[in-house]
Image (cartoon, rainbow, N blue to C red):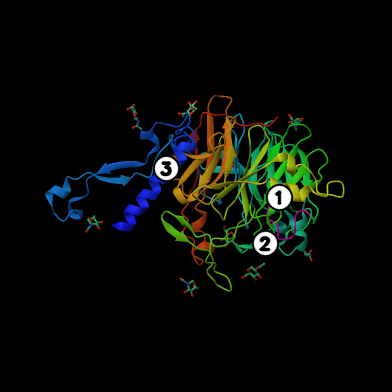
Amino acid sequence: MYPRIQLAGLLLSVIVLVAGQDNSSVFDFPEYPPPLTPPPNQTIADSVATLPANETGGDPALASALIHFDTGKFGPPVELVHAYFDFWPTGVAVSSDGRIFTSFPRGNESFTLAEVNSSTTEKPFPDQDTNTPPAFVNASNPGFSIVTDKFILVQSVIVDGQDRIWALDVGRPRVNGSTLMAAVPGGPKLIGFHLNGTRFTTITFPASVVFADSSLNDVRVDLRGDGFAYLPDSSPQRPGLVVVDLKTGVSWRHLDNHPSTSVQVDLISFHNGVPTYIHPPISPFATTPFNRFAADGVALSADGEYFYFAPLSARRLFRIPTSFLKVQPSALNPNAILLANQAVQDLGDVGSHLNGLESDDQGFIYLTAPEHNAINRFNPKTGMIEPFVRNPFIQWPDTLAVASLKDGGNFLYFTCNQLWLSPDYQNGTDLRTKPYAMFRVPIEGGKAKQL
Ligand SMILES: *[C@@H]1O[C@H](CO)[C@@H](O)[C@H](O)[C@H]1NC(C)=O
Ligand SMILES: *[C@@H]1O[C@H](CO)[C@@H](O)[C@H](O)[C@H]1NC(C)=O
Ligand SMILES: *[C@@H]1O[C@H](CO)[C@@H](O)[C@H](O)[C@H]1NC(C)=O
Ligand SMILES: *[C@@H]1O[C@H](CO)[C@@H](O)[C@H](O)[C@H]1NC(C)=O
Ligand SMILES: *[C@@H]1O[C@H](CO)[C@@H](O)[C@H](O)[C@H]1NC(C)=O
Ligand SMILES: *[C@@H]1O[C@H](CO)[C@@H](O)[C@H](O)[C@H]1NC(C)=O
Ligand SMILES: *[C@@H]1O[C@H](CO)[C@@H](O)[C@H](O)[C@H]1NC(C)=O
Ligand SMILES: *[C@@H]1O[C@H](CO)[C@@H](O)[C@H](O)[C@H]1NC(C)=O
Ligand SMILES: *[C@@H]1O[C@H](CO)[C@@H](O)[C@H](O)[C@H]1NC(C)=O
């Protein structure tokens, strides 16, 4: 007993000392729940129930006991909008007239960018020809990875604030399911289309900006002024961010190998409660932590002043003022790299590794949470992560897209693609089940346009 009493006395004197200097309360933390948070009975995934008779040992007193359990659900209603019966999806983008665009990071799939043309089918966008690089005509043609006017592997598609489509082609053909071929300048590209399918720009990258082993994963465009595009390079070897001046097409890198863009090497992520490792079916068959993808999901704040990003293989969110990214490192700006590295803000742990990020015009940053079958949101005003939607059908939420529809309604669309069940994580066995799914949930805010 003696040491405990002593400790209590010590604690008391510390509290008195603090109280004497400062009358602020330890309960003076930012307002929570913040405005717009659904009522607790919609955010807390808890309920109570009795257990079946065979699980209470036949004891009538236990059979009537109401035991607390997790329903797996909270938040706004989740609506299934598309079922994918053919190809495995990543990207989704929705125009103001409700057209839905989606991308397939293909191996030998016949198209990689598509428009949804019924609730269960997709058609190539803008057409089949643009989705057919020469290698698909002549498989032995070694030049296939430098094709610039055709798609190789479209990882991501977005609709910008002017209702235009941007397709991000990683430019690395994927063969035999998982082997990514090297990128060659001209292959990786950003292509802009009007909604009618007319191309308005094609931006390629020099070898000093997008490397042979680079893996551009997503894109956001800021249309204010002359305009910039920001793209994460999720390559675990050389992660970083790529910035494009949309007026000149000139591009450069920032945050190369910075901790904020890099993988957490010892991450073990959990899906449906099961620890997930990389367990590839190829030599040397070695199991590793879940460390394959670096800077992955990105979002631009509603006012365009902050670029948010997160490595897929980590549970942290970061942001950087875009003013630092817009400065091209060069003899004219020799300190640009140092200053950008120092401007990164670590927003802390977000409770799940994450890939998709998206902003709305109220300032929220929506965050996928594949480890919780959920989408949460970061509130920059409070610095807190808020619960948003959780549902057992949210099986690896991959890409998020906010749309404000002309016919009414603001929605957050997202694809669910069961990535952790694919062969690379399951020792060569494909545990995914078709169809893959696209859902949407209503949100209060609208599309952030950065015009
Ligand atoms: C703290 O003390 C100051 C000065 O005595 C007073 O004006 C203020 O209202 C107090 N704040 C709280 C939260 O009690
Ligand atoms: C939450 O509580 C309110 C007020 O008691 C009630 O009207 C509403 O139906 C409840 N919602 C759910 C999802 O239970
Ligand atoms: C009770 O019965 C269900 C359904 O037959 C079965 O799945 C479960 O394992 C049983 N529980 C126990 C404790 O035996
Ligand atoms: C969707 O597009 C595909 C490919 O062009 C086509 O075969 C299919 O008939 C279309 N379905 C609908 C419902 O329009
Ligand atoms: C395919 O491409 C290879 C390499 O460029 C070429 O040698 C071959 O003739 C081509 N085959 C056909 C059928 O075009
Ligand atoms: C793809 O698989 C085929 C058949 O197993 C093999 O011949 C070929 O070398 C593989 N290609 C690559 C790039 O791994
Ligand atoms: C190509 O696609 C077909 C049909 O989807 C599949 O059966 C085949 O195994 C694939 N081949 C390779 C090399 O990926
Ligand atoms: C497509 O839309 C753009 C932008 O509205 C327009 O400039 C262009 O002429 C259209 N192209 C066709 C073929 O209709
Ligand atoms: C993984 O698959 C290989 C090849 O089928 C097999 O030899 C090995 O035992 C498997 N490992 C595990 C942990 O299942």
Q: Which residues are magenta?
A: 209-216
Q: Disc 1 beta carbon < 8 A from ligand 6? A: no
Q: Secondary structure at mark 1?
A: helix
Horizontal side of residue 212 vs 394, given as left or right:
right
Location of residue 59 in the rendering, given as x and y in whole percent from the top left corner: 13, 52
> What residue sits right under mark 1 in the picture?
341
Q: Quadrant of the N terminus?
A: bottom left
Q: Quadrant of the C terminus?
A: top right
Q: Is residue 210 magenta?
A: yes
Horizontal side of residue 328 vs 18, given as left or right:
right
Location of residue 68 in the rendering, given as x and y in whole percent from the top left corner: 28, 45
> What residue sits right under mark 2 in the picture?
237
The total of numbered circles placed on residues is 3
Location of residue 195 in the rendering, given as x and y in whole percent from the top left corner: 68, 34
Horizontal side of residue 357 vs 81, given as left or right:
right
Mark 2, other Cα within 10 Å: few <14 / some 14–19 / many ≥20:
some
Q: Disc 3 beta carbon < 8 A from ligand 1? A: no
Is there a contact, CB below 8 Å, between mark 3 and mark 2?
A: no
Instruction: Please name whichever residue, 207 or 108, is drawn nearer the observer in this view of the structure.
Output: 207
Instruction: Please name whichever residue, 324 or 225, is drawn nearer the observer in this view of the structure.
Output: 324
Is there a contact, CB below 8 Å, between mark 2 and mark 1?
A: no
The answer for how far apart the CA atoms under marks 2 and 1 are is 18 Å
The answer for how far apart the CA atoms under marks 1 and 3 are is 39 Å
Location of residue 5 in the rendering, given as x and y in whole percent from the top left corner: 32, 53
Instruction: Please name whichever residue, 382 or 407, is drawn nearer the observer in this view of the structure.
Output: 382
